[in-house]
Image: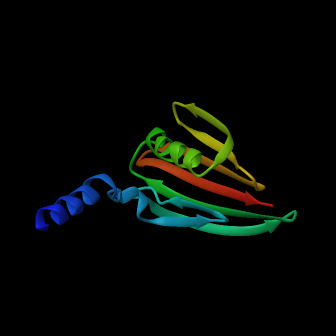
Amino acid sequence: MFLVILLAIWTYVHFWTVPERPEDSTLISIGSVWLPVYPGAITEATASNERDHALESTFRFRSKDAASKVLSFYAPKLRTARFQSYLSHRNASGGMLQASAAGRDTKIVITAQSSAEGSEVQITTIDR
């Protein structure tokens, strides 16, 4: 009986639990959108403004990583957060991700530009 219980515990731990990844442990709300904070991000500013019956929220940060690496981190997060109408534009100095939320009037724009020390990133959401 003891062996069966031990086997059941081992099976549960190895097949039904998902290890927590560090990048998923800290979330930030930008408007109505919850996203993981980029690992090692240094916050520059946050702001929210109501304009034309919409709430525009912004989160700006710096990273020591290249802009392309930051955009690559957020691209799959938008897809798994049920955003659609996905648009990506990238160039040598950075790029932009833009998406609309499925089933609600929320848009998100993530821009990342290269800087001397890594990259500067701005995440903006617009909730109508």
Q: How is the image coloured?
A: rainbow
Q: Which image quadrant: the N terminus?
A: bottom left
Tell me: 41 left or right of 6.
Answer: right
Question: Which residue occupies 58% across, 52% down?
Answer: 81
Question: Which residue occupies 23% across, 60% down?
Answer: 8
Residue that extends furthest to the top in the rendered view of this protein? 92
Question: Which residue occupies 34% across, 56% down?
Answer: 16
Q: Is residue 114 visible?
A: yes
Tell me: 24 left or right of 14.
Answer: right
Q: Is residue 5 above or below residue 109?
A: below
Residue that extends furthest to the right in the rendered view of this protein? 52
Tell me: 86 left or right of 16.
Answer: right
**Quadrant of residue 46 in the image?**
bottom right
Residue 7, given in percent of the width and then of the height, sits at 18, 58
Residue 28, given in percent of the width and then of the height, sits at 53, 66
Towards the viewer: 113 or 55: 55
Towards the viewer: 28 or 63: 28
Q: Is residue 118 above or below residue 9?
A: above
Towards the viewer: 52 or 73: 73
Tell me: 122 left or right of 64.
Answer: right
Q: Which image quadrant: the C terminus?
A: bottom right
Residue 61, given in percent of the width and then of the height, sits at 51, 58
